[in-house]
Image (cartoon, rainbow, N blue to C red):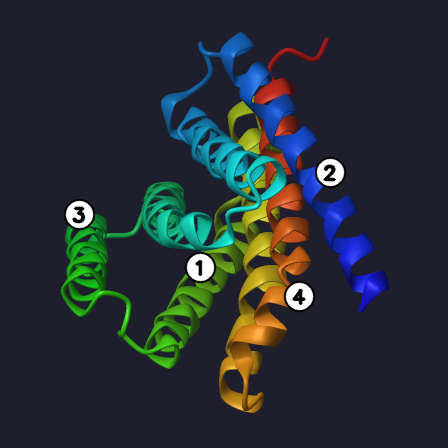
Amino acid sequence: MIIIEIISSICKVVMFLTTCYLFFNGLKYRNNENLIFSFWYLSVFSLIDSVLYIYFILINKDINSYKSISNWTQLIYILIEFNIISNFLLEINKIKFKKLLRIIIVLLSLIIFCVTFINNWSFKEKYYSIITIIELVFINSLSIRYLLFISPDIPDLNSKQKSIIVKGIFLFINITSPYYVIIQYVISTPNSIMSALSFINDIGYTVLFIYIIKSLKCQYKK
């Protein structure tokens, strides 16, 4: 258990430093394409979550307050994250009914938030794992489609930037989602295990942010 705590702490520090690096690089490369630059906003929400963690957990040792606040901030973050990723993948894949799919995704996000709010977090975690499976299949399908069939054999700068982010998204979703689903359906007490293995999430976000940084900086390489 001590080893897991050490690994978790290291992963949190690495993720925080990567998030800061993405945030400041995003300020520097604001002129980048809007579709790609939208991923920079993920670093803003991640920093907010990190600040809450530092203030409530590390400084005040107030775990209950952190959980009550972070539950909502993380839910909002996840929903915005899914909308940014799905909007990006729908756009670059040139999906015929992308406008309809965007509306469906936005409505689904609002429904999830409203149901969670009305039920005051009594909405069962296993229901969320079903949504995670849908998200996993949806994002993987669009990512693989772009990398295998849409991405040009001789990419220009713009398509190279997009391919870098798609690779990051593919790695991110396949690092963070499967373990969450497996734990919810296999482990009898998933919450305790989920907390111990939260560093897997940190690894996934670190990988995603590294690829976003590479994409943002790609335009300015000589």
Q: What amino acid does circle 4 point to?
A: Leu
Q: Name the residue carrying label 4.
A: 197
Q: Which residue is mark 2?
A: 14
Determine the CA span between mark 1 and mark 2.
Answer: 25 Å
Question: Whole-Å distance between the Cαs marked 4 and 2?
Answer: 16 Å
Residue toward you, 121 or 108:
121
* Eye-nearest disc, 4 or 1: 4
Q: Which residue is mark 3?
A: 99
Residue 16 in the image: x percent, y percent?
64, 34
- For the residues labelled 2 and 3, the Cα–Cα distance comes to 37 Å
Q: Position of residue 148 (x, y in %)?
A: 56, 56
Secondary structure type for disc 4: loop
Q: Amino acid at mark 2?
A: Val
Badge 1 marks a residue whose secondary structure is: helix
Separation of marks 4 and 1 at Cα, in angstroms: 23 Å
Q: Earlier in the sequence, mark 3 or mark 1?
A: 3
When asked about the image quadrant of residue 12, the answer is top right
As measured in the structure, the alpha-carbon distance from the residue carrying label 3 to the one carrying label 1 is 17 Å
Q: Which mark is nearer the camera, 1 or 2?
A: 2
- Look at discs 3 and 1 and give the one toward the viewer: 1
The image shows residue 19, relative to residue 77, as above or below, that is: above
Local SS, label 3? helix
